[in-house]
Image (cartoon, grey):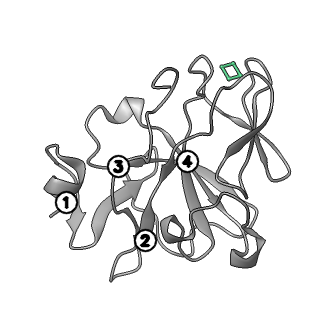
Amino acid sequence: SLTRVFEREYTGPVYSDGVALVDAEGEQIAEDRLAPGEQLTVFPASHPGIERAPTLLVRFEEGEYGGETRAEFTVGGYAAFSKVCTHAGCMVADRDGTTLVCPCHSGRFDALSGATVVGGPPPRALPQLPITLSSDGYLVATGDFEGPVGPGGG
Ligand code: FES
C-alpha cells in the first residue's frame, strides 16, 4: 500500500497507483498540463509537511532524457525533482535551457540527467520524485523522494 511506500499518514487523494501531485491552488495535474520544455511547481498532495516538499515538475520529449535519469521515475516525458536546493535550501526557481538554476549561489542541475549537479556549490543532485499517470490521467507520485530533501543528508 502507499502507506507502506511512504511509511507515513496521508490526507490527500490517493490512487491505487500513487498520491496526487497538485499545483499551488491544489488542482491536480492532468497529463496534458505542460508542453515539452515547460515546468511547474507542484506538491505531492499527501506529503506530510507539504510546505517543505515543493517539487519541480518538468516535461521534455521522452527521448531527450539520458545520463542519470531514472527512466522508471518518469512518465510521458515528465520528471519531478525536489525544488529545495541541496546546498543551502533556497528554492531552485530559475531555468537556463534544460538546466535548473538556483538563484542563491548559481547552483546548476541538469534536468535531463537526474538533476545532477553541473555547476556551483551544491553537493548532490536534487532528489527525484518517482511519478506515473493514474488510471484517469493525472500525475501521481508512486513513492517518496529518492533521497533527502534539501541540505544535509550526505
Ligand atoms: Fe542553491 Fe546555494 S542554496 S546554490
Residue type for callout 4: Phe
Position of 147 compared to 33: left or right? Answer: left
Q: Which mark is residue 76?
A: none
Q: Earlier in the sequence, mark 4 or mark 3?
A: 4
Position of 147 compared to 59: left or right? Answer: left
Horizontal and vertical percent for residue 29? 46, 64
- Mark 1, secondary structure of its residue: helix
Q: Earlier in the sequence, mark 2 or mark 3?
A: 2
- Mark 4, secondary structure of its residue: strand
Residue type for callout 3: Asp
The Cα–Cα distance between marks 1 and 2, rounded to whole angstroms, is 14 Å
Residue reaching furthest to the front = 154
Q: Residues within 10 Å of mark 3 (few under 14, many from 20)?
A: some
Q: Earlier in the sequence, mark 1 or mark 4?
A: 1
Q: Quadrant of ligand 1?
A: top right
Q: Residues within 10 Å of mark 1 (few under 14, many from 20)?
A: some
In the rendered image, which residue does mark 4 sit on? Answer: 81
In the rendered image, which residue does mark 2 sit on? Answer: 132
Give the position of the N terminus as an image quadrant: bottom left
